[in-house]
Image (spheres, rainbow, N blue to C red):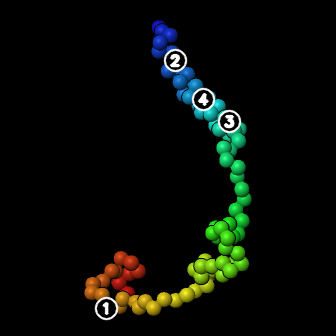
Amino acid sequence: MQGIHTNWRRYLPAALGGAGVALLVVWLARQPGAPLTPRVPGADRPAGAGAAAAGGNPVLLGKLHPGDGQPATDLPGTWPGFRGPD
């Protein structure tokens, strides 16, 4: 005969699931603590930067600016696991 002290284990998963669903509902029903603003282009510019900063960072403009680097072709050893032994 099962006592009342061992019967609670049968309902524990359902109770935890119900508590989880209740917490999820409370979390989703709350309003955000800070007002949310949409992301707009140019919002990352510093204050006071007007049209002069529109040119901005050349890397972010989507153009290729090749550097003066050279490929390292004279390194010793092989790395056959990268693209095979060829």
Mark 2 Cα shell of 10 Å, populated few (<14), some (14-19), many (≥20): few
The residue located at (67%, 70%) in the rendering is 48
Q: Which residue is mark 3?
A: 25
Q: Please indicate whether residue 22 sits to the left or right of residue 65 in the image.
A: right
Find residue 19 and name its label. Answer: 4
Q: Position of residue 68 (x, y in %)?
A: 45, 91
Describe the element under mark 2 as helix, strand or loop: helix
Q: Say few, some or many: other residues with alpha carbon within 10 Å of mark 1 (under 14 / 14 to 19 / 20 or more).
A: few
Which residue is identified by label 2?
A: 8
- Which badge, 3 or 2, comes first in the chain's sequence? 2
Vertical placement of residue 80 versus 70, above or below: above
Q: Quadrant of the C terminus?
A: bottom left
Q: Residue at x 27, y 87 (%)?
A: 76
SS state under label 1: loop
Label 4 secondary element? helix
| Residue at image mark 1 | 74
- Compared across the picture, whether 34 is left or right of 83 comes to right
Location of residue 56 by image quarter: bottom right
